[in-house]
Image: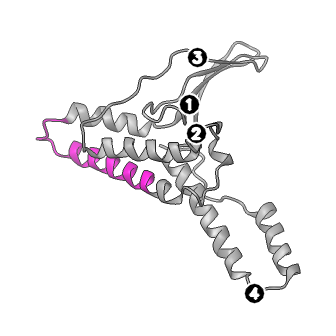
Amino acid sequence: MLARPYALEGPRLTVDATGVALLGHDETPAVTAEPDSDFDNYLQARAVLFAAVRDDTEDTPPLVVEATDPRAVRKETEAYAEAYLRAVNRCVRSLENTHSGSADRDRAELALLLRTDMLQVDLTDVRGGRRRVVLVAPTHPLRMLWWSGQAALADHWLDRLADEDRATVLERLHSLSTSLVPLGFPWSCP
């Protein structure tokens, strides 16, 4: 996903009853938008953030989101999430206007935005039953924003410990690493 910021949907996965996963070859096409539209601004912010996460420098292998310091990409993450919100809001407002001549385009854009970074997984159980689940990738705007905010909160807490003794700091660090529970974490997106 990080290598293809203009492809909003992830690949399809199929998992059989033995647990073997097969990645689909149906690669989703890259999306284009009208220049300078909110949707285009979202795609551009996404490309900038993904380039920062990949650390696009020579001889550096692309990273995964989880291997990136969220503080290093905070500005890009916030711009990405804000652009996503603006694009979704513009589509919704436009669709509320019954006299809009762009309803089909707005509906299509909104559908793409709401499916951003969703991975469909087709599961087959031992009895031959089939189910489809949808996973939200770590690159989804809400997940990226949560990840960045969680890091900012941890930094704030650690800054407040600057004048504390070593034992207190170690106790709090241990607490942060073992007891921080992401209540309200967006485990799913509508």
- Mark 3, Cα crowd under 10 Å, few <14 / some 14-19 / many 20+, is few
Tell me the crowding category of disc 1: few under 14, some 14 to 19, or many 20 or more residues within 10 angstroms, Cα based.
some
Q: Is residue 28 left or right of residue 129?
A: left
First-in-chain label (1 vs 3): 3
Q: Could you say whether the residue bearing mark 3 is in a helix, strand or loop?
A: loop
Between residue 155 and residue 3, name the one nearer to us: 3
Q: Which mark is residue 137?
A: 2
Which residue type does callout 2 highlight? Ala
The residue lying furthest to the front in this view is 58
In whole angstroms, how far apart are the C-alphas of marks 3 and 2? Answer: 16 Å
Q: Which mark is residue 140?
A: none
Q: Is residue 112 magenta?
A: no
Which residue is disc 4 drawn over? 163
Q: Please tell me the numbered disc located at residue 24.
A: 3
- The secondary element bearing badge 4 is classed as loop
Q: Quadrant of the N terminus?
A: top right
**Label pair 3/2, CB-CB below 8 angstroms:** no
The residue mark sitting in front, 4 or 3, is: 4
The amino acid beneath tag 1 is Leu
Whole-number angstrom distance, CA of label 2 to CA of label 1: 7 Å
Q: Residue furthest top?
A: 128
User: Residue 55 appears at what percent x and percent y?
Assistant: 58, 45
Q: Amino acid at mark 3?
A: Gly
Magenta segment range? 79-102
Label 2: how many Cα within 10 Å (few below 14, some 14–19, many 20+): some
Whether label 2 touches label 1, CB < 8 Å: yes
Q: Nearer the viewer, mark 4 or mark 1?
A: 4
Identify the residue under disc 1: 119
Q: How is the image coloured?
A: one colour
Sequence-wise, the earlier of marks 3 and 2 is 3
